[in-house]
Amino acid sequence: MNPIKFIQEVRKEGSKVTWPTTRETLTGAVMVLIITAFAAVFFLIVDQIFSFGLNSIIEWSL
């Protein structure tokens, strides 16, 4: 395939894309940050619970 024709077709297809607005992009980014923060806190709590439980079992067995 001719590289020039390929680039023209890529540009043509790219112009058909419906790009998100700035507001939509910011809203999505904020939602990702919030969900990531909640997941981090959740896994921190679960990790602490498992750590406490395993330490209790290990100390009890000694």
Image (cartoon, rainbow, N blue to C red):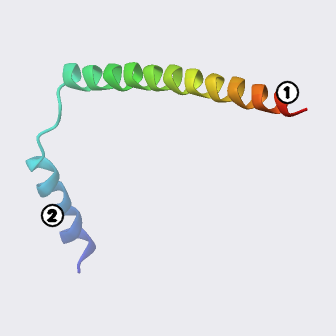
Q: Which residue is more in the foreground, 22 or 52?
A: 52
| Residue type, mark 1 in image | Glu
* 36, above or below 7, in the image: above
Estimate the x, y position of residue 52 in percent, counting from the top left: 71, 23
Residue 20: x %, y % from top left: 17, 32
Image quadrant holding the N terminus, namely: bottom left
Q: What x and y, as percent, mark residue 35?
A: 38, 24
- In the image, 49 versus 28, the foreground residue is 49
Residue drawn at 69 percent across, 27 percent down: 53
Q: Nearer the viewer, mark 1 or mark 2?
A: 1
Q: Is residue 6 left or right of residue 60?
A: left
Q: Find disc 2 in the rendering and name its residue.
A: 9
Q: Residues within 10 Å of mark 2 (few under 14, many from 20)?
A: few
The front one of 23 and 8 is 23
Q: Residue at x 39, y 19 (%)?
A: 34
Residue drawn at (21%, 19%), measured in percent from left and top? Answer: 23
